[in-house]
Amino acid sequence: MRDPVIIQCAVTGSQPVGGDGPSNIPSTPGEIVDAAVEAWQAGAAVIHLHAREEDGTPTQDPAIFRAIVDGIRERDCDAILNLSCGTAGGNSFGDERYRVVAELEPELASFDCGSINFGERIFEGDLPLLRRMAGAFRVAGTIPEIECFDSGFVGLALQLRDEGLLDDPLRIQFVVGIPGTGVPATPAMIEHLRSRLPDGALWTVCAPGRHQLPVNLHCLAWGGHVRTGIEDNRYLRRGQGATNATLVERVARLAGLVNRPVATPGQARELLRIPARPG
Ligand code: ZN
């Protein structure tokens, strides 16, 4: 048997709901809770969460995150909850983005480690902001999942590590194939990014749409962890809408084919070295 794989499911994201395609994006707090529990039951050890208001509008409001987290825990779900510190689809900026870390002290939260063109926008993360954010994570006892959209993001993560602001093992998520970033979802790009990581770093890759499945396979084959979910891809195959649970089930089946056991939430906490918490 090879190393266990942590399956992470990104259940909703911050894309607008509606429009073309299947209407399968969990878009209210209640739907996000249901999707998280179903993904966990299908084998996801980590659930990546964005918050939405009742009308589907993405938000970084900690009160809405808290309602979603409480709703998931009330269903006896023990998955690691990884809260987004992104821009809520362009609705939240600067230090506002990570207020949820200070207020909820989650086990894991996203830490976008730099600035980049992102679609039609610029995603901002200057070094002073990254230092303040790293400090807030440390105070909260929250492990940063370091989102790296290109090689420069990895360089900044290494700089923050040298400055003593990020700890080993680095928990890295590469994000490739996003339109407007100029970073293609290719094995060569993923392997270049991986080549920059220090020993012991854990890695996974987020890739959108049709790139998700081949990138999932790449990660399973080469010792990475796996991210799936409706945030990144709404289709099981061409023309057939997915659910979060069906996407997780597919990754779990593929993991079995390459002899990688699927980590339970408890095993994932050990692998990610998430400290045990009282209660
Ligand atoms: Zn996200």
Image (cartoon, rainbow, N blue to C red):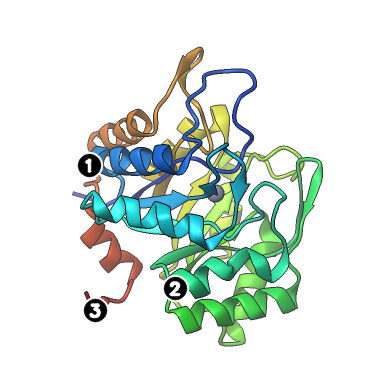
Label 2 vs label 1, nearer the camera: 2
Ligand 1 contact, mark 2 (Cβ < 8 Å): no
| Marker disc for residue 133 | none
Closer to the chain start, of discs 2 and 3, is 2
Q: Quadrant of residue 182?
A: top right
Cα gap from disc 2 to disc 3, whole angstroms? 14 Å
Ligand 1 contact, mark 1 (Cβ < 8 Å): no
**Residue 104 location in percent, x, y?**
44, 69
Please tell me which residue is depicted at 73% across the width and 79% down the height of the picture. 128
**Residue 219 location in percent, x, y?**
42, 45
Please tell me which residue is depicted at 22% across the width and 42% down the height of the picture. 259
Residue position marked by numbered label 3 in the rendering: 278
| Marker disc for residue 142 | 2
Relative to residue 102, is residue 178 depicted above or below? above
| Marker disc for residue 259 | 1
Q: Are marks 3 and 1 in contact (CB under 8 Å)?
A: no
Q: Foreground residue, 92 or 243?
A: 92
Please tell me which residue is depicted at 22% across the width and 60% down the height of the picture. 267
Relative to residue 192, is residue 247 depicted above or below? above
* Residue 54 visible in this rendered orientation of the protein: yes
Cα gap from disc 3 to disc 1, whole angstroms? 34 Å
Give amino acid for label 3. Pro
Q: Are marks 2 and 1 in contact (CB under 8 Å)?
A: no
Cα gap from disc 2 to disc 1, whole angstroms? 31 Å
Relative to residue 19, is residue 70 depicted above or below? below
Q: Quadrant of residue 181?
A: top right
Please tell me which residue is depicted at 25% across the width and 45% down the height of the picture. 260
